[in-house]
């Protein structure tokens, strides 16, 4: 899965760069949708890579260490686009509506339940890329 994850992350990075170059142009909306879809692919692939590494499934209220934080956050990132990849929405059980600290990032999902996904919810596009690369480095994905 690592090769698939690398490809998914690179594709998302390229879509993010494309979008950045389209801001303020007639192509901005299409580039934004493309970036969002490729984020969904990368987020789902990140959690699938976690499964391939035989890490346990996420469990509410099990936050013993940074690895557990990653598992919970990766699960939430996967769930968000899973039902509609072109219009992801946060639908979270209460135990997952919390702050996550992993890879030197703090991602606060405590107030986003039932809202459409926005990149600023997770600290931006670069934060997602950093999380995915960190997880690979740690052997979690």
Image (spheres, rainbow, N blue to C red):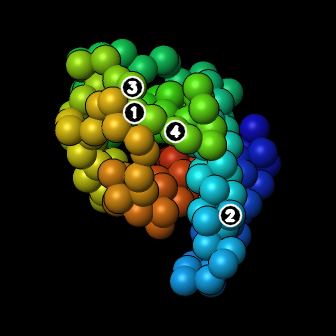
Residue lying at 24% horizontally and 19% vertically, measured from the top left:
94
Q: Which mark is residue 90?
A: 1
Quadrant in the picture for residue 49: top right
Q: Are marks 2 and 4 in contact (CB under 8 Å)?
A: no
Residue lying at 77% horizontally and 55% vertically, measured from the top left:
7
Q: Which mark is residue 88?
A: 4
> Label 3: which residue?
91
Q: Along the polypeptide, which appears first: circle 2 or circle 4? A: 2
Residue 93: x percent and y percent? 31, 17
Q: Is residue 137 above or below residue 14?
A: above
State the SS at label 4: loop
Q: Residue furthest front?
A: 26
C-alpha separation, residue under disc 3 versus residue under disc 1:
4 Å
Q: Are marks 3 and 1 in contact (CB under 8 Å)?
A: yes
Residue lying at 20% horizontally and 38% vertically, measured from the top left:
111
- Quadrant of the image for the N terminus? top right
C-alpha separation, residue under disc 1 versus residue under disc 4:
7 Å
C-alpha separation, residue under disc 2 versus residue under disc 4:
16 Å
- How crowded is the residue under tag 3: few (<14 C-alpha within 10 Å), some, or many (20+)? some
C-alpha separation, residue under disc 3 versus residue under disc 4:
9 Å
Is residue 139 visible to the viewer in this orientation of the structure?
A: no
C-alpha separation, residue under disc 2 versus residue under disc 3:
25 Å
C-alpha separation, residue under disc 1 versus residue under disc 2:
22 Å
Q: Nearer the viewer, mark 2 or mark 4?
A: 2
Residue 53: x percent and y percent? 63, 29
- How crowded is the residue under tag 2: few (<14 C-alpha within 10 Å), some, or many (20+)? few
On the rendered structure, is 92 left or right of 99? right
> Label 2: which residue?
30
Q: Nearer the viewer, mark 2 or mark 3?
A: 2
State the SS at label 3: loop
């Amino acid at each position: 899965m690592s090769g698939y994850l690398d490809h998914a992350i690179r594709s998302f990075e390229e879509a993010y760069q494309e979008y950045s170059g389209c801001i303020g142009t007639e192509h901005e909306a299409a580039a934004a949708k493309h970036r969002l879809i490729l984020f969904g692919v990368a987020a789902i692939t990140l959690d699938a890579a976690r499964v391939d590494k035989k890490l346990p499934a996420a469990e509410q209220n099990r936050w013993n260490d940074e690895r557990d934080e990653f598992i919970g956050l990766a699960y939430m990132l996967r769930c968000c686009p899973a039902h509609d990849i072109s219009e992801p929405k946060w639908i979270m059980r209460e135990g997952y509506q919390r702050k996550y600290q992993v890879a030197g990032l703090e991602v606060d999902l405590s107030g986003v339940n039932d809202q459409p996904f926005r990149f600023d919810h997770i600290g931006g596009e670069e934060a997602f890329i950093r999380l995915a690369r960190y997880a690979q480095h740690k052997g979690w994905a």
